[in-house]
Image (cartoon, grey):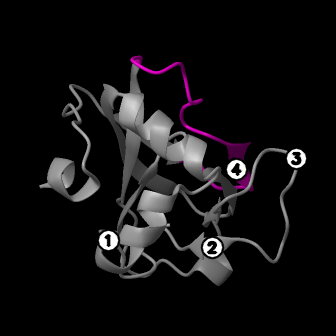
Amino acid sequence: ALNRLLDIHLTVPRSAMASCYPGGGSHYKAHLDSELAAPGTIWRQVTAIMYLNPADWDATRDGGVLRCYPGAKAGTLSAEDHVDIAPVGGRLVLFWSSQLLHEVLPSFRARYAITMWFMGDNTKVHKLASKAPGCNGALRQRRATLTKPPLFC
């Protein structure tokens, strides 16, 4: 279904990354999960993050928010141009691995997540991204059908 919705062929990941931020202000600086490699390269296309935190997670108290910068590039971050997603248990976040600059803000409580990267030939993604840098045009056009904020940034 995801392949049809995104109009791209993706491979189901064979493994996942379990992460635990121990609290105490642990964080992860702004980054992309995949640089946009040359057309034809098999690489990370879509990032999927499932949060495994307790139901009483409070982003104000516990932190650990995923901050997304749609359309931004490293070095051009702006406090006004971001979307914050609280890591509430059971929440699934999907985004283009090579298009969304994101970071994990300081966490003051143990924060748990499982991350998977759907792989694929990036020829089509490369063409889409070259037409509209940052969050590509296809994502913006499909955002209404793909998103029910804050599940997709």
Q: Secondary structure at mark 2?
A: strand
Q: Quadrant of residue 70?
A: bottom right
Q: Nearer the viewer, residue 61 or 116?
A: 116
The residue wearing badge 1 is: 146
Majority secondary structure of magenta residues: loop
Q: Are marks 2 and 1 in contact (CB under 8 Å)?
A: no
Residue 44 painted magenta:
no
Choose mark 2 or mark 4, whichever is in front. 2
Q: Secondary structure at mark 3?
A: loop
Q: Residues within 10 Å of mark 4 (few under 14, many from 20)?
A: some
Residue 27 painted magenta:
yes
Q: Nearer the viewer, residue 132 or 98?
A: 132
Numbered badge on residue 75:
3
* Mark 3–mark 2 distance (CA, rounded to whole Å): 17 Å
Q: Is residue 70 left or right of residue 118?
A: right
- Observer able to see residue 57: yes
Q: Residue at x 75, y 72 (%)?
A: 81
Reply above or below: 64 against 98: below
The residue wearing badge 2 is: 83
| x then y, percent, for residue 138 | 42, 59
Residues in magenta, as a range: 21-41
Numbered badge on residue 27:
4
Q: Is residue 79 left or right of residue 70?
A: right
- Amino acid type for the residue under numbered disc 4: His
- Amino acid type for the residue under numbered disc 2: Val
Q: Are marks 3 and 4 in contact (CB under 8 Å)?
A: no
Choose mark 3 or mark 4, whichever is in front. 3
Q: Residue at x 41, y 70 (%)?
A: 141
* Mark 3–mark 4 distance (CA, rounded to whole Å): 18 Å
Q: Is residue 150 left or right of residue 48?
A: right
Number of marks in the image? 4
Q: Quadrant of residue 151?
A: bottom left
